[in-house]
Image (spheres, grey):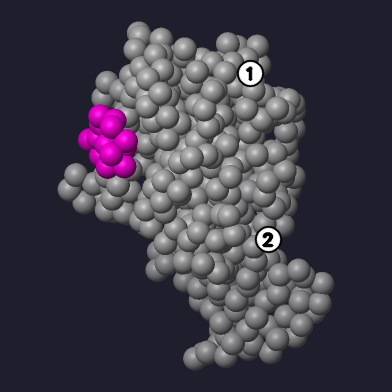
Amino acid sequence: MLEFSLAPRRDEMTEALCKILSIESVKSAPQGNMPYGKGVFDALIKTLGIAEKLDFDSVNFYSHLGYVEYGDGDELFGIVTHLDVVPAGDGWTVPPFAGTVKDGRVYGRGAIDDKGPAVAALFALSAIKENCISLNKRVRIIFGCDEESGWSDMDFYKANGGEIPNMAISPDAEFPIINAEKGLLQLRAVKKAYPGEGGDGLTVESLQAGERVNVVPAVCTCKISGNTKAVWQMMDLFNEDSPVKIAAEEAADGLVLTAHGVSAHGSKPEEGRNALAFMILFLNTLPLKKNAVSDAVYELAEYIGMQTDGTHLGIAASDESGALSLNLGYFRTTGEGVEAGIDIRYPIHTEKETVLSAVRSRMKGLSIEEMFSRPPHYVPEDSPLVVGLKQAYEEVTGEKAYCMTMGGATYARAFPNSVAFGALFPGQQGTEHQADEYIEIDSLLKTADIIANAILVLCK
């Protein structure tokens, strides 16, 4: 059982986290030896530098990820974190990339997802090392760099000799323990541009919303032209009952429409208000001229709309892991046509091909392409890993540990015997992928204590 606490290192941990949060580590175009762009590379180098100051020998794994290690033995216990983040988005009241300490919290994009937990893990292992505690397994903290955009860092690690942990945790979700993760399927719905038709209808010139498929879009803008009198009339009616209002502003040759919703993680779309979905429902009430944009709008309104469970697509499903969820994550118009992103999290007993086939059979007017997928992931509750984590959690918190299922996709599913373990505590509000993302400093310290105890239980 843990005989020390990370509480005396509160200021040191907070300072380290703020330094990493100050780096805008959103994936961008590769540059030289920076496969995920300069921001992600800088965050990796900064983190490894902090680890070096804590007396670790760090490894930069070809800039796809990095790691530190402590302990002895043939077996490897992994703690898999990530340093890349989603774009800041709109609605922040503090700078998203500054590491703002306020009211017992540290604010910044990545504070809870997943830079804060990465710092907690690093200092947990540092405390064990400083206390000269011998371990019978090697503990490796992996700092991933492409969790939010495709996991190519994990693919590279495994394809280039990276050691596979015998057991692992990913502190990128919730406590106590998530031993089952739903399947993940991200789709691209495409409609190529073609000559529109004449007539008196309205033309949707552009429709833009969202940046990532796994984020509920908070803002949507639309440029519309033609006889806009009908727009004003329908807008008044629509706004009477809609929790997300449509605003209009006169522009050259038409109107610019804007909707402001509430962002949320794409695995929990019901917790947000999807500005794109509301805009599509509004456009669906208007007489639009036929073109690629209107085709996509009408199809998405009919088969998705405000639904987050896939009922109209014929893919709604549920089992002991929970219900299927669906997020309409982005919409883009270009000279080549339109593209929309759909994020689906399906129960562990549902087959990916069943979901994909159903979507394609309903949305025949759009080309449905698979962007990214991951199968469901499950570790038995009576496994030594889960049993040990329950003990570690209960010893630190004094609360009963239990297992859960989630729709989110964490790095736990990158390795066979791995589960998500923290860092959000029961009853706390999740702010990942949202404006004003934060981690409570007390929770940061408690997470470090729990991870340190988990290392002792499983590796001592």
Give the quadrant of residue 138: top left
Q: Which residue is drawn at 42% across and 29% down?
A: 127
The residue beneath circle 2 is 273
Q: Position of residue 96 (x, y in %)?
A: 47, 62
Q: Is residue 281 above or below residue 442?
A: below
- The 10 Å Cα crowd at callout 1, few under 14, some 14 to 19, many 20 or more, is some
Give the quadrant of residue 217: bottom right
Q: Residue at x 37, y 53 (%)?
A: 19
Q: Report whether residue 301 is seen.
A: no
Farthest residue to the left: give it.
Answer: 32
Q: Residue at x 35, y 9 (%)?
A: 73
Q: Is residue 358 above or below residue 165?
A: below
Asked if the stretch drawn in magenta spans residue 372, the answer is no
Asked if the stretch drawn in magenta spans residue 56, the answer is yes
Q: Position of residue 108 (x, y in %)?
A: 48, 57
Q: In this view, does 231 lie above or below 212?
A: below
Q: Identify the secondary structure beneath mark 2.
A: loop
The residue beneath circle 1 is 391
Are discs 2 and 1 less than 8 Å apart at CB? no
Q: Position of residue 220 (x, y in %)?
A: 57, 69
Left or right: residue 449 compared with residue 65? right
CA distance for labels 2 and 1: 38 Å
Q: Which amino acid, by three-letter code, is at mark 1?
A: Gln
Farthest residue to the right: give it.
Answer: 241
Looking at the image, which is closer to me, 36 or 170? 170
Looking at the image, which is closer to me, 265 or 400? 400
The part of the chain drawn in magenta is 48-66
Left or right: residue 107 compared with residue 281? left
Quadrant of the image for the N terminus? top right
Q: Report whether residue 162 is seen.
A: yes
